[in-house]
Amino acid sequence: MTSPVKPTFKTEVLPLSLIALSVVASFYFYANFPDQVPIHWNYQGEIDDYASKEFGAFFFPALILGIYLMFLFIPFLDPKKERYQDFRKAYHVFKAAIIIFMVLIYGYTGLAGLGYDIPIATVIPSAVGILCIIIGNYLGKIKTNWFMGIRTPWTLSNDEVWNKTNRLGGKMFIVMGLIMVFAPLLQMNSEIFWWIFIVSIAVVAIIPIVYSYILYRKIEKNTSNQPKNDQP
């Protein structure tokens, strides 16, 4: 069965190469990790959880592979699979960006597990910010489907609402991404930055939902007010 997004060598070579790199790195990390390695940091960049070196070495590569396989199979499961042809480029960009992000996080946390002084409080927010910017640039190109984009009862019911809401959401993702990238570089107080981060997520989550509802009601009202043509 042909995939709705038609993966090719060009679309798959980067994510597959990065997955292979993470697998190779996992054996290096396993051979050099101490018995306990850090796996979680609080918003101040302080380690607050540890795990075995087996978990630290192999969990992320397994997770990355799982995410990649999920991207391959999702289009087959979507009742709107025929729409994926309309945004296949954006779909592959999303897939590659998330794989790159996960491999970078794995690399940085792996180096931290080896004892290197990695500025996690700066690196992780900046990486998340860059990912948000990439997602924001392509979110408006996603067409109606059940797995990607801003999915509300109103966006899924009307293509115009879907398109306008996702374009708005894309712009908001870009703004949030810029905040995530530059705020740590300003040496902002970590607690202030954390609150900015929480508020940004809340705004990006809530405004598109409200907007999609208002837009849907407006379109429905305009449609109902249009005069009906007399039938012969």
Image (cartoon, helix red, strand yellow):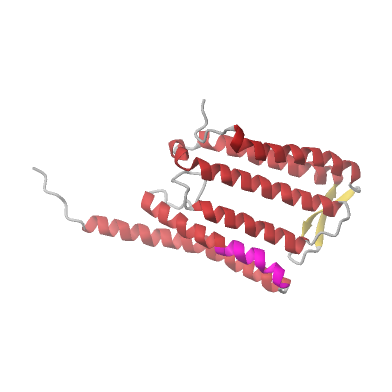
The region drawn magenta spans 175-187
Residue 155 against residue 69 in the figure, above or below? below
As rendered, which of 79 and 105 lies closer to the eye?
A: 105
Q: Please state if 82 lies on the left or on the right of 60 as rendered.
A: left
Would residue 130 be counted in the magenta stretch? no
* Residue 211 image offset from top left, x and y in percent: 42, 62
Q: Is residue 124 left or right of residue 54?
A: left
Q: Quadrant of the C terminus?
A: top left
Task: Mark yes or no: residue 42 visible.
Answer: no
In this rendering, is residue 118 above or below 2? below
Instruction: Reply yes or no: does residue 176 show up in magenta.
Output: yes
* Front in this rendered view, residue 213 or 115: 115
> Residue placed farthest to the front in the image?
10
Q: Residue at x 22, y 58 (%)?
A: 225
| Position of residue 44 measured from the top left corner of the image (x, y, whole percent) | 76, 67
Q: Main secondary structure of the magenta part?
A: helix
Q: Position of residue 125 (x, y in %)?
A: 69, 61
- Residue 102 position in % (x across, y down): 70, 48
In the image, taking residue 92 as reference, residue 46 lies left or right, namely: right
Residue at image x 52%, y 31%?
Answer: 3
